[in-house]
Amino acid sequence: MSFSSRRRNYMLTPHRRDGLIEWMKHMLQHSFVLDCLAQTAPTTFQHFEELIDEHRMLEGDDTKISKLQILVPTIGTFHTPLPLCAAFLIYDEKYSVTSRRHVTLSFNEIRQILNLSQVMALCSPFHASPPTHTPSPQIGLSITSPPPSPLPSFTCPKIITFDGDQTLYSDGSNFESNPSLASSLHSLLKNGITLAVVTAAGYEYSTSKYALRLTGLLKYFKEKGLTEEEAGRFYMFGGECNYLMRMNGEYELEAVKENGPGGWITSTKHLPDTPGNWSPTSITSLLSVAHTSLTSSLSDMKLPARVILKKRAVGLIPLPSKTLPRECLDECVLRVQSALHEKAGEFENLPYCAFNGGTDAWVDVGNKRVGVEILQAYLGLLPTQCLHIGDQFLNTGNDYAARTCSPCAWITCPGETGYILKKILEIGGATTMISPTTPRSSLSKSISLGDMTRRASVEQCDPSVTSDRSRTEAVMDVYTGEILPPSKKPKT
Ligand code: IMP
Ligand code: MG
C-alpha cells in the first residue's frame, strides 16, 4: 500500500459543522457556565451584530480582512444586517432559554434565532437597506418585464426561492396534503410575491413529472383560485438551474422559452455561469469524472446502491428497500468533491454541485447559486430582495451554494418552512392573508410571535406533510423520473 500524502486520511474538510453557529455557541458557553446568560446574552448578540456590520462594510475590499473572517474563516456573505439582539430577546421572551440551568443554547436554537433575525431584516424597512457592495441588477438585459411590486403595505422579499425535498415536502415524497403550508404560499402569491422552487430534482422538461411532485399544492391553488398574473409568479427550476418552468392560468407547469427574445437563457447570457455558456465537452468531462468517482466509492464501500447517469447529473442511489448510511454518503460526496476539484481544468470551471441528498449522493451540472442568480437577473431583482429557504446548508449540501447570492433561512423540515412564511406574512403586514376556508381563530393562533420557532422544533416533521408514496395517483421513481406500475414501490 502506498503511503503517499495524497492517500493519508487527513480530516481535510470539517463537515457536518457550520462555522458561524459553532462559534456563536462557543461564545455563549462562558456566560452559561457563570449563570449570567440573562444579563450578558443580549450584549453578546449585539456584539455579533456589530461584527457582521463590520464584515459587510469590508466585503469587496481585498486590502482588509474583517474580525469575523479571522474568527470564522469559513464565513460567507451577509446580504443584510441582522437584528440578532432583537431576535434573541423575542425568542427568549417566548422560550425562557436564559432561565435554563443545565442545557445551554443549542445549535438549532441559534439557527432559529438567525432565521428569525433574517426574516425581521427583510420584512422591516429599517433593516432592508441594500449594502454598499451590492451590484446593480441587470434590468436592462432582462427582456421580461420585472414582476409588479408587492402591494404597498406589505414589506417583504420580492422573491422567495425554495428547495424542494425536505423544505416543501419530506425527502423523496411529494407535496400532497399540507393546507397550512399551501395557504401561506397562496397568500404570498396574492400579496404580489414571486415564488420559485429551485430543486436539484431534474427530469428535463417533463413538466408533468415536476407537477406530480407538487400535486397537492397545484390542486390547492386551483381550488382557491389565482389570477393569471398571480399564477405566472410561480416558477419551478429543475436540475438546480437547468430547466425553468412557470405556472400558467390552468395551474399547470409549462417550460419557459429558453432562446430568442424573452428566453431565459438568452436574457441571462451575460452571467458567466449560465447554462447558455456551458460547452457540451465540458459537461461530458465533468459527468465522466463524477461517474468514475461515484462508481469506485460504490465498490470500495460495497454499497447496496447503483450509479445512474442523466443528461446533466450523476447520482448514486440506493437499491430498492435499502438505505445508505450517512457516513458513506458523506464519504462519497467528499471524494467526488476532491476529484472534481483536482480535475477542474478538464471542464473549464463549469459550475457544479456534489451533495448528500439524505438518502443518495449526486453531482449536478450547475448549482442553486446559478439558479437563484438567473432568477434575479431574469426578473431584475437585487439579492436584498430575495430569500432562499432550504435544508442543506452544510458543505455537503446543495442549498449551501445559494448563500453567496441570496439571504437564506436554514430549516430542517416543511413545518419550519411554514412558520417562516407565516412570520413573513405577519411581520410584513400582508393584506390578503386568510384563505376562505381557514378559520380566523386557528390562523391567528398559529402565527403568534415565536410560534414559528417553537412549533418547528416540536414538530420536527409534520406528519401531514409526510406522504406514503403508494397513495399518489401516478407512482414515479423520484430519482430517475421513471413512471412505475403501482405495485412497484420506489425509493427505500
Ligand atoms: P432538493 O432537496 O429539492 O434540491 O432535491 C434533492 C433530491 O432530489 C435528491 O436528494 C434526489 O433524491 C432527488 N433528485 C432527483 N433527480 C435528481 C437529479 O437529477 N439530481 C439531483 N437530485 C435529484
Ligand atoms: Mg432539500
Image: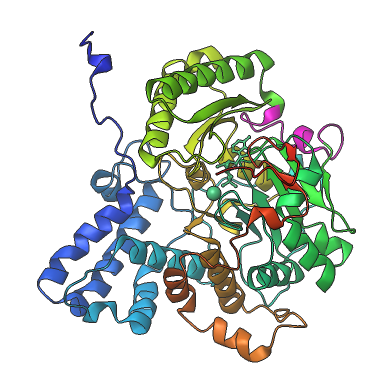
Q: Residue furthest top?
A: 2
Total numbered circles: 0
The answer to whether any part of residue 314 appears in the image is yes
- Taken as a whole, is the magenta stretch helix, strand or loop? loop
Q: Quadrant of the N terminus?
A: top left
Estimate the x, y position of residue 102 in percent, counting from the top left: 17, 73
Q: Residue at x 53, y 63 (%)?
A: 129
Start-end of magenta stretch: 258-275
Q: Residue furthest front?
A: 487
Describe the colour scheme in one phrase.
rainbow
The answer to whether any part of residue 341 appears in the image is no
Estimate the x, y position of residue 7 in percent, counting from the top left: 27, 16
Estimate the x, y position of residue 75 in percent, counting from the top left: 35, 46
Left or right placement of residue 251 versus residue 450 in this view: right
Compared to residue 381, the image places residue 339 above or below, namely above
- Residue 272 magenta-drawn? yes
Left or right placement of residue 405 versus residue 197 in this view: left
Compared to residue 387, the image places residue 290 above or below, namely above
Estimate the x, y position of residue 165 in percent, counting from the top left: 58, 51
Q: Residue furthest bottom?
A: 441
Residue 260 versus residue 34: which sits nearer the camera?
34
- Residue 457 magenta-drawn? no
Q: Quadrant of residue 88?
A: bottom left
Left or right placement of residue 326 versus residue 476 in this view: left
Left or right placement of residue 214 versus residue 305 in this view: right
Q: Quadrant of the C terminus?
A: top right
Q: Quadrant of residue 184?
A: bottom right
Residue 35 versus residue 313: which sits nearer the camera?
313
Residue 212 versus residue 74: which sits nearer the camera?
212
